[in-house]
Amino acid sequence: MARHLNYRLAKIHRNYTVEEVARVWGVHRNTVREWIKRGLKTIDLKRPLLVHGRDLAAFLGDRRRRNRRPCAPGEIYCVRCRVPRFPAGGVADYEPLTSMQGNLIGICPSCDCVIYRRASAAKLPEVKGGLDVRLTNPLAHIAERVEPSVNSDFNTGGKR
């Protein structure tokens, strides 16, 4: 499973051993050794292997940037499939969270899970692309409920 490791944890003026890198980022030592094989620079090839913090931060930052999958207009990122997808049927719901922004909600055509994309109301025409977007539940609040709550501590007249 791919994880987003925070490259900002690396102190740029510090040297790290393989074991220290593994402990700080919560990965196995063999993972760090694999990073070295894939291009993470070491200070020299002598044991113990030392990695400069600046090189480690650059390596993890580049790794994160390479793995980014930006969504095109009309696409919503599916977390399960790990790729941007057009919602099934070309239909999405827009559920406002505030007066300024909300969520586009659709169904992934591959894995049938619910997919979400945050979008501002002002940029909704650009974000939706060719999707048929329906407005749902415009800022419904608890105070606006018509039916009373059935959870009540008040005595309704009967004996307990």
Image: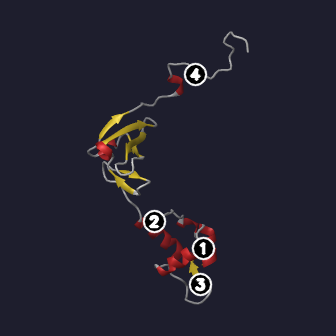
Whole-percent x, y for residue 55 in the image: 51, 76
Mark 2 lies on a secondary structure that is helix
Residue drawn at x 62%, y 85% is 48
The residue at which mark 4 appears reads as 149
Any part of residue 17 in sight: no
Q: Report, in whole angstroms, how far the alpha carbon at label 3 lies from the one at label 1.
A: 11 Å
- Image height of 110 relative to 8, above or below: above
Q: Residues within 10 Å of mark 3 (few under 14, many from 20)?
A: some
The residue at which mark 3 appears reads as 49
- The amino acid type of the residue labelled 4 equals Ser
The residue at which mark 1 appears reads as 21
Q: Residue furthest right?
A: 160
Name the side, left or right, on which 150 lies relative to 119: right
> Which one is closest to the eye, mark 4 or mark 2?
4
Mark 4 lies on a secondary structure that is loop
- Image height of 5 relative to 96, above or below: below
User: Does the residue at mark 3 contact the one at mark 1 (Cβ under 8 Å)?
Assistant: no
Foreground of the two, 128 or 14 = 128
Q: Report, in whole angstroms, how far the alpha carbon at label 4 lies from the one at label 2.
A: 47 Å
Whole-percent x, y for residue 131 in the image: 29, 43
Q: Report, in whole angstroms, how far the alpha carbon at label 2 lies from the one at label 3.
A: 23 Å
Name the side, left or right, on which 3 lies relative to 111: right
> Which one is closest to the eye, mark 3 or mark 4?
4
User: Does the residue at mark 3 contact the one at mark 4 (Cβ under 8 Å)?
Assistant: no
Foreground of the two, 45 or 8 = 45
The disc at residue 64 is 2
Residue drawn at x 39%, y 44% is 119
**Count of numbered labels shown in the rendering:** 4
Q: Quadrant of the C terminus?
A: top right
- The amino acid type of the residue labelled 2 equals Arg
Q: Report, in whole angstroms, how far the alpha carbon at label 1 lies from the one at label 4.
A: 53 Å
